[in-house]
Image (spheres, rainbow, N blue to C red):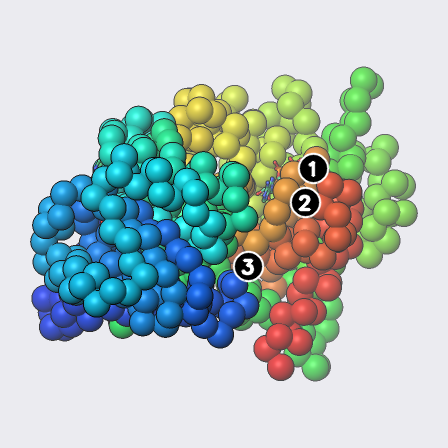
Amino acid sequence: MQPVLTAIEMQQADSAAIEKLHISPICLMELAGKECIGYMLEKLSLESPEGLQFLIVAGKGNNGGDGFVIARHLLNLGAAVDLVLLYPEGAAGGAAEANMSILRAYEEEGLPLRIFNSIEEAIPFVSEQEYSVTIDAMTGTGLRLEAPGAPLLSPLAEGVELLNALHERSEALCMAVDIPTGLDATSGHAAMPAVTADFTITMGFMKTGLLLQDGPELCGEVHVAEISIPGFLAEDAGAFLIDESFAAEHFALRSEGSAKHMNGKVLIIAGSSTGESSMGGAALLAAGAAVKTGAGYVAVSIPPSLAATLHIAVPEAIVIGRDMDSLMEKARWSEAILIGPGLGRSPESIDLVRALLSHPDIFEKKLILDADALYAIAEAGLQNVLSAMPEVLITPHYGELARLTGTDAGSVTKDPLAAATRFADTYSTTVLLKGRPTIIAKESGPVLLNTSGTEALATAGTGDVLSGMVAALAAKGECLPEAAAAAAWFHGRAGDLASDVSSLVSASMVRDAIPSAIEEMFDFED
Ligand SMILES: NC(=O)C1=CN([C@@H]2O[C@H](COP(=O)(O)OP(=O)(O)OC[C@H]3O[C@@H](n4cnc5c(N)ncnc54)[C@H](O)[C@@H]3O)[C@@H](O)[C@H]2O)[C@@H](O)CC1
Ligand SMILES: Nc1ncnc2c1ncn2[C@@H]1O[C@H](COP(=O)(O)OP(=O)(O)O)[C@@H](O)[C@H]1O
Ligand SMILES: [K+]
């Protein structure tokens, strides 16, 4: 899995590369610029930029320095470059300043290079020009914002406005160097205004801010450029990105001689039915998902009035009622227990959750708590009970985590990484916080981020499918954090495969696409 760094972690990796490994800043900057050229040509499907026109807007830090290297290489390859300096020359110092002096020397050679010393000086010329690519080299990991949405000050604001205006009214692609200007590399919150890029070449390692909040909208496609900062300098990163090989590694294939009871026994306690309403669908989706994720046995505790429906919808499942003795017998038999989808919010459901969580046959198993089980925990104030359980995972969305922590959804939305990590540490539990990205936090461990999946999953019932998948992987032998992470990845991929038109995807379609999403991994590995 690739590390995902905060701005501070990236600055530490940069410093370690320079101070401990003696890699020169000039060398890092050179590689950063070269990587941008290579990837940009790939995006343009061109062998060479010869004859094309590029605009670079540069800030006063090392991000601007990367822009100077890009300018030089473009000129070397026969392109024409307009460079806008937002700040007086020499403000950068170090490697950036050294690269700027090379450009000044180039200027004397009569190359197609125009250097503008301010945005005002540039405007009359650049507004007339057609560019192939406009390049944002104003700020990267050095940007500091007081608050999300804080105003970006002059001259950065004018630089951003220029690039965004060109983006809107011309065919030019906009490339962000490292991070779109205005985007906080750690939190993913954007300033006002911020650059909207078509693609972002980020240096060395992925940054958290590219995956959170406004990050995905502003970055476009993200490419991580290898600039010779070795991976071991990011080993202690606070976050890692779940990928397909991780997911495949955590899907145990059935061994040839295995029997059904050896391939994961899941108990799902879900669904509700009262005189007024019935919530059987969630149980059906979770059970179907567990079956399609390859569990050897799936038992479902559901109100007796829904049993016939479940038999028809998921014929593979064993159906039991709500009687405590049969529930506990199946709990002892099972290897992972999922409680919650469609359980309802009545006082009886809350009492049921309280009773279940106090029983060792339940809490000593790998336990996955979802949906209405989370409502019951919040209502009955059972959060502390989680701390005593050996292996427990909660799978809230933002609203559910807010209810569990006594805050509003807005504060989880503001910093979901911190909210998930805090809960995991406080209650010694694993948290799968659903969203974009999905965040898996475990006590004192690095956070895992999942970016597979799209708005195809933004439809009722996909969360029930996900919790059924987690339960199956956990029963098949994975520890809960890994089961959650692999399930999240497969779930996103199943959403992609469910339909070519994301707006038509339903939760049943995601459930039905699970086998293809998993199968594909093994084709990939072969
Ligand atoms: N050795 C290194 O550290 C390397 C850095 N690289 C590049 O350098 C970048 C980081 O360079 P820097 O640390 O110089 O920072 P940046 O180039 O991101 O620039 C930040 C500059 O903007 C100013 N600034 C910060 N917040 C501001 C705000 N709200 N309003 C106005 N100005 C603000 C800062 O004072 C600083 O001068 C990376 O993103 C990457 O592009 C690469 O060249 C690879 C090597
Ligand atoms: N825009 C989106 N992009 C990616 N994933 C999404 C998006 N919207 C929702 N999801 C995913 O869909 C699932 C929805 O779960 P949840 O809100 O619990 O639904 P429900 O309660 O209806 O089953 C989560 O896994 C979430 O991460
Ligand atoms: K930038």
Question: Which amino acid type corresponds to the residue marked 3 in the rendered image?
Answer: Ala
181 over 24 or under it: above or below: above
The amino acid on which the numbered mark 1 sits, given as a three-letter code, is: Thr
Q: Residue at x 86, y 53 (%)?
A: 315
- Of tags 2 and 1, the one toward the viewer is 2
Residue 249, given in percent of the width and then of the height, sits at: 53, 70
Query: Horizontally, is 175 left or right of 357 in the view?
Result: left
Q: Is mark 2 within 8 Å of ligand 2?
A: yes
Decide: few, some or many residues near mark 2? Use Cα within 10 Å; few <14, some 14-19, many ≥20.
Answer: many
Q: Which residue matches tag 2?
A: 456
Residue at 25% x, 51% y: name it: 115
Classify mark 1 as within 8 Å of ligand 2 or not, answering yes or no.
yes
Instruction: Check whether the beta carbons of the residues at disc 2 and disc 1 lie within 8 A of each other.
Output: yes
Residue at the spot of label 3 = 486
Q: Give x and y (percent) for residue 410.
A: 44, 24
Which residue sits at x=51%, y=38%? 168
